[in-house]
Image (spheres, rainbow, N blue to C red):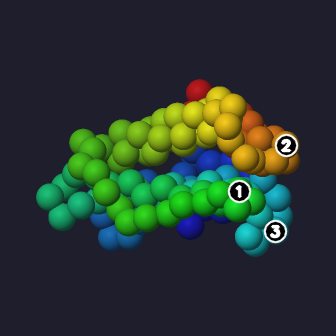
């Protein structure tokens, strides 16, 4: 499992045996603000993604889903999911996040841009 402040794109090859996990941590705290992506091969040879994040009171996670033609396609889809979700949250003028939550969202978006450029 990869756990660091940015995804390591010098990662080991994706394998069918177990999920490959990527995580962006904004602090060194175990339960600090973070987002995580996992990619795993389906039984039919396609690839699935799993996404999760935790920022203050906001968070989500779920099962593996999707049928992508490659592991890279599943990974890029997960990165785009976070970009869209975090930007939508920042753009919502009715949102109840604190200024600190918004800073964390902007930092996660910046890290996602760095690692997928």
Secondary structure type for disc 2: helix
Image coordinates for residue 84, horizontal then vertical, percent: 52, 34
Mark identifier at residue 99? 2
Residue highlighted by disc 1: 55
Where residue 29 is drawn, which disc sits there? Answer: 3
Disc 2 vs disc 3: Cβ atoms closer than 8 Å?
no
Report the mark closest to the observer, 2 or 1: 2
Q: Is residue 82 above or below residue 58?
A: above
In depth, the one of 63 and 95 nearer the eye is 95
89 vs 8: above or below? above
Residues marked 2 and 1 touching at CB (< 8 Å): no
Asked whether 7 or 35 is in front, the reply is: 35
Where residue 74 sits in the image (x, y, percent)?
37, 45
Mark yes or no: residue 23 visible: no
Q: Secondary structure at mark 1?
A: strand
Residue at 74% across / 70% down in the picture?
Answer: 31
Q: Nearer the viewer, mark 2 or mark 3?
A: 2
Q: Which circle's residue, 2 or 3, is located before the other in the chain?
A: 3
């Amino acid at each position: 499992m990869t756990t660091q402040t940015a995804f390591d794109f010098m990662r080991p090859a994706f394998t069918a045996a177990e999920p490959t996990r990527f995580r962006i941590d904004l602090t060194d705290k175990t339960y600090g603000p973070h987002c995580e992506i996992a990619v795993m091969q389906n039984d039919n040879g396609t690839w699935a993604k799993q996404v999760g994040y935790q920022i203050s009171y906001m968070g989500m996670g779920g099962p593996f889903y999707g049928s992508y033609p490659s592991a890279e396609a599943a990974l890029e889809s997960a990165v785009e999911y976070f970009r869209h979700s975090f930007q939508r949250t920042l753009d919502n003028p009715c949102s109840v996040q604190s200024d600190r939550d918004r800073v964390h969202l902007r930092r996660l978006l910046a890290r996602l841009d760095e690692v997928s450029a």
